Image (tube, rainbow, N blue to C red):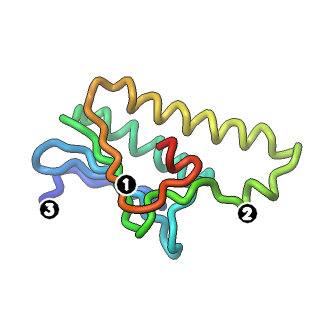
Amino acid sequence: MNQLLVNTMTTVNFHIDEQNIAHILFDRPDASANVIDSGFVSDLASAVEQALAAEPKGVLLRSAKPTFVAGGDLDTLYAAGPAEAQQVFDMVSLLKQSLRQLETSGRPVVACINGAALGGGLEI
């Protein structure tokens, strides 16, 4: 694939192809599944912002794993207590904002669901 613009984050890869289609690829390193945690949400927000700034014809959301997104990082969520409430709220708010940007961008957005899409993965 001829990539015109490439930007690689930690858990989400992003590029614009030769047809001006934005590809947002979920690919958590050293893990068998993509899960939603603060790093994923931050990377997704950056990828969405950069993708939409490039004014693509459309956006594809894909996974490099056998599952699409396995939902929230349960270890992190179980460990969260009252002291982490604001941090969890901010993370969920940023995820919601990113998905809303895609929804209202006026561009076609396709989620290429290649396996399980659980919890937040189904929301995506």
Residue 113, disc: 1
Q: Residues within 10 Å of mark 1 (few under 14, many from 20)?
A: some
- Residue 37 place in picture, x, y as percent: 62, 54
Between the C-alphas of marks 2 and 1, the distance is 24 Å
Image quadrant assignment for residue 70: bottom right
Which of the marked residues, 3 or 1, is nearer the chain's N terminus?
A: 3
Residue in the foreground of this view, choosing between 121 and 4: 121
Q: Is residue 62 left or right of residue 55?
A: right
- Judging by the rendered image, the residue that carries numbered circle 2 is 75
- Residue 92 place in picture, x, y as percent: 63, 39
Mark 2 near mark 1, Cβ–Cβ under 8 Å?
no
**Helix, strand or loop status at disc 3:** loop
Which of the marked residues, 3 or 2, is nearer the chain's N terminus?
A: 3
The residue lying at 46 percent from left, 35 percent from top is: 99
The residue lying at 55 percent from left, 39 percent from top is: 95
- Residue 107 place in picture, x, y as percent: 26, 29
Tag in front: 3 or 2: 2
